[in-house]
């Protein structure tokens, strides 16, 4: 304001704009300060909760890249039976859920020998796994803390807590995490029958039943321990699979070596492949033992997450087009174990025109099939 004397009177001239503008600017500045203070207080609260390791990480599961994979009960039991994928099983049920668990479901959970970590403690354990994991696992088959690339399966009563636990693990950098769809309530009715002579999860992960092969009892496992020749920890033979074995593929869902050769040759003559041949072995196996000419590679460990990817992301990651419901897919592994598991995953994802190569790469080689 500027004051002037003219004729004995004082005149006041407003040179800074209207009073309304000044009030609005003041209110805007005050609002900004209030919002910044609220945001700072929220950040401090989150940091305090995370330091106390009692809260869950902040996550936004907004697309398929951040959505945890879900295993159907049938695929879960096939994974448990596997001698080569060797998943880490984590029970995230709360104390209340454990108290309300049906006796039959409780027997199944004990048989699986899972690592018991309540979901409210999961973030703390995974962040401090060097010390906290062994306290939970003790001397069980999963005593070694998992790496970021290990296959982890979270289990709860009905699957909701397991899905949340898988999301927590993904937020902390774990790449191969899954939840059982429907939880123990859905998986228990499909559990393979146990017997007194059946290997337990402990023997499975200590190397007594390891490696994917179709040999008999004289063949050694990965750690050099003698094998019983069973295809699964529940006692089915790889050469004579019982009806109770979930890894058994009916003859009508397998494809012989000669039939695959004919399909590949005919597709080559037509200029368009009739089938997509997917090798689900590990990278080192494919490099060491070779591959079938014309096959593409997608390891069984990566398949659950891969099936959630959009087609463009799938193509960039694995260098072949994502199969659709109308495509014929043939999967193979060293024998048939992992291929059977992959077939189940593909079927759960809606790809029902899927076959398993009979006897896998070993049968292909023994029959004189060409490779790369």
Image (cartoon, rainbow, N blue to C red):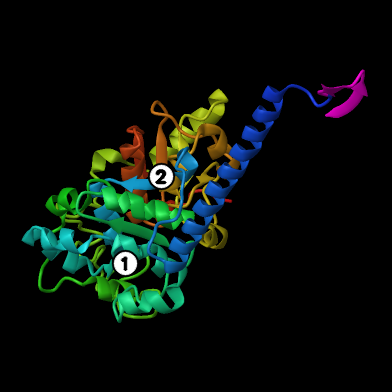
Q: Residue at x 30, y 81 (%)?
A: 139
**Residue for badge 1:** 215
Q: Residue at x 84, y 24 (%)?
A: 15
The segment highlighted magenta reads 1-14
The quarter of the picture where the N terminus appears is top right
Which residue is at the far top?
7
Image spot of residue 2 (x, y percent): 87, 28
What type of secondary structure mainly makes up the magenta span? strand
* Horizontal relation, residue 60 to residue 34: left or right: left
Residue 4 included in the magenta stretch of the image: yes
**Residue for badge 2:** 331
Q: Which quadrant of the figure has residue 33?
A: top right
Q: How many marks?
A: 2
Camera-side residue: 14 or 253? 14
Residue 357 visible? The answer is no
Which residue is at the far right?
6
């Amino acid at each position: 304001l500027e004051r002037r004397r003219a004729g004995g009177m004082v005149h006041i001239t407003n040179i800074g704009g209207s009073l309304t503008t000044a009030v609005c600017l003041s209110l805007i500045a005050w609002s900004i300060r209030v919002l910044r203070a609220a945001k700072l207080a929220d950040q401090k609260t989150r940091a305090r909760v995370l330091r106390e390791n009692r809260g869950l990480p902040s996550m936004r599961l907004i697309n398929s890249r951040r959505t945890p994979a879900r295993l159907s009960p049938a695929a879960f039991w096939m994974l448990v039976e596997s001698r080569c994928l060797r998943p880490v099983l984590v029970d995230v049920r709360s104390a209340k859920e454990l108290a309300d668990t049906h006796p039959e479901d409780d027997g199944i959970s004990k048989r699986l020998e899972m690592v018991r970590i309540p979901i409210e403690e999961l973030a703390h354990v995974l962040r401090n796994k060097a010390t906290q994991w062994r306290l939970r696992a003790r001397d069980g088959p999963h005593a070694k803390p998992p790496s970021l690339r290990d296959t982890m399966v979270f289990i709860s009563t009905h699957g909701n807590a397991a899905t949340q636990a898988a999301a927590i693990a993904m937020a902390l950098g774990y790449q191969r995490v899954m939840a059982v769809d429907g939880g123990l309530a859905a998986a228990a009715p499909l559990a393979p029958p146990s017997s007194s002579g059946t290997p337990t999860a402990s023997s499975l992960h200590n190397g007594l039943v390891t490696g994917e092969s179709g040999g008999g009892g004289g063949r050694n496992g990965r750690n050099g321990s003698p094998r019983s020749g069973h295809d699964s920890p529940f006692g089915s033979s790889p050469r004579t699979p019982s009806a109770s074995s979930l890894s058994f593929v009916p003859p009508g869902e397998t494809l012989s070596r000669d039939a695959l050769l004919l399909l590949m040759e005919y597709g080559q003559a037509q200029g368009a492949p009739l089938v997509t041949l997917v090798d689900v072995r590990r990278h080192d196996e494919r490099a060491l033992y070779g591959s079938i000419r014309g096959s593409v590679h997608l390891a069984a460990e990566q398949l659950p997450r891969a099936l959630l990817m959009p087609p463009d992301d799938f193509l960039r990651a694995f260098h072949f087009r994502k199969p659709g419901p109308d495509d014929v897919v043939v999967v193979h592994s060293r024998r048939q174990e992992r291929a059977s598991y992959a077939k189940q995953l593909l079927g759960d994802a809606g790809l029902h025109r899927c076959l398993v190569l009979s006897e896998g790469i070993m049968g292909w080689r023994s029959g004189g099939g060409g490779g790369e």
